[in-house]
Image: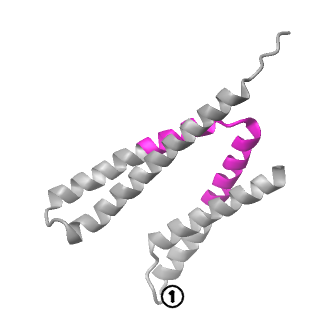
Amino acid sequence: MIERRVDAGAWRDRTRRDLLRLASWTGAWAVTMALATFGPARMWDAPGLTLLAILLNLAIGVGMIRANIRHLGTLDEMMRRIQLEAMALALGVGVVVGMSYSLLDTTDLIAAHAEIASLVMLIGVTYLVGSVVGYWRYR
């Protein structure tokens, strides 16, 4: 049986490049989200431009998802497991808490309206905590 040696430097460079690609797509998605959100109120008063900004945000979002999948493919088995466990935790918390939050709003048990931004922040924090705990647990 022939063993294949993995060049650690090449793997590190590829992982860094894919992580930078993911960061670029994520940054572009955040910029297009801000454009689609604030453009209609502060920059233009044209539904066509708003639709275009939303479609651009959607297209960039698809690119961000693809970059994330590609990045996961470059990780070693342990790092991939940490990321997938953090993503599973974030998805689970997002769905369970999000649905309960929505029910609280629709049944008028809370005064405020359930805002998606709050749920997005919760998912982000959950993912971050899950990643940190995973790195700590598997180190």
Q: Residue lying at the far front in this picture: please name it.
A: 9
Magenta stretch encompasses residue 67: yes
Residue 70's quadrant in the figure? top right
| Residue 108 falls left or right of residue 90 | left
**Residue at 60% across, 57% down:** 91
Q: Residue lying at the far top in this picture: please name it.
A: 1
| Residue 56 falls left or right of residue 26 | left
- For label 1, the crowd category at 10 Å Cα-Cα, with few meaning under 14, some 14 to 19 and many 20 or more, is few
> x, y percentage for residue 65?
49, 44
> x, y percentage for residue 48?
16, 56
Along the line of sight, which residue is nearer the eye, 51 or 27? Answer: 27
Residue, disc 1: 110
**Residue at 53% across, 81% down:** 104
Q: Residue lying at the far left in this picture: please name it.
A: 46
> x, y percentage for residue 130?
70, 59
> x, y percentage for residue 37?
31, 65
| Residue 22 falls left or right of residue 50 | right
Residue 77's quadrant in the figure? top right
Along the line of sight, which residue is nearer the eye, 92 or 53? Answer: 53
**Residue at 45% across, 46% down:** 24
Q: Which residues are magenta?
A: 63-92
- Kindly report the secondary structure that dominates the magenta region of the rendered protein: helix
24 versus 73 height, above or below: below
Magenta stretch encompasses residue 11: no
**Residue at 24% across, 64% down:** 39
